[in-house]
Amino acid sequence: MASPSTQEVFIQGITHSGKTFRPSDWAERLAGVMSQFRPGGAQPGSHLSYSPWCVPTVIHGVKCVIVNRALHQHEPMAWDFVMNFARDNELQVAEACLLPDPPSAPPKRP
């Protein structure tokens, strides 16, 4: 499902048939379940923030979860859980590398 050359896998909130996946907060719920899987392992309070390996976002109006390949290296069962979630719910999955935003230009002076 994922080739080793990409750094991230994007699970999109669109099914293979093109329907929007419900419930509308599915991405936040999935990322919340995965919050304990993080560099250095779970720490007190780590359930209060998302893991950097599994982050919900919106791309072009579509809810997504970005899953970093490091999750597979450190927690293979957690990786399998996320990938099986996508497969079982027939969600579209895209492999990509997340690029940083370009630096913004300084504000123009009047």
Image (spheres, rainbow, N blue to C red):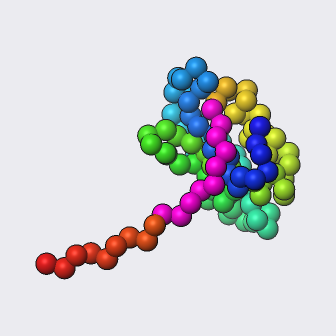
Residue 36 vs 10, above or below: the answer is below
Quadrant housing the N terminus: top right
Image coordinates of residue 103 in percent, x first then y, are: 43, 71
User: Quick check: can you spot residue 82?
Assistant: yes
Quadrant housing the C terminus: bottom left
For the point 66% across and 60% down, the residue is 52
Q: Quadrant of residue 35?
A: bottom right
Residue 63 vs 72, above or below: the answer is above
Q: Quadrant of residue 74?
A: bottom right
User: Quick check: can you spot residue 68?
Assistant: no
Left or right: 38 in relation to 24: right
Image coordinates of residue 30 in percent, x first then y, are: 65, 42
Left or right: 32 in relation to 24: right
For the point 45% across and 42% down, the residue is 60
Q: Is 2 in the magenta?
A: no
For the point 49% across and 45% down, the residue is 59
How many numbered discs sit on the rendered protein? 0
For the point 59% across and 37% down, the residue is 12
Task: Look at the image and give the residue range highlighted in magenta.
Answer: 92-101
- Residue situated in front as seen by the camera: 54 or 97: 97
Left or right: 104 in relation to 71: left
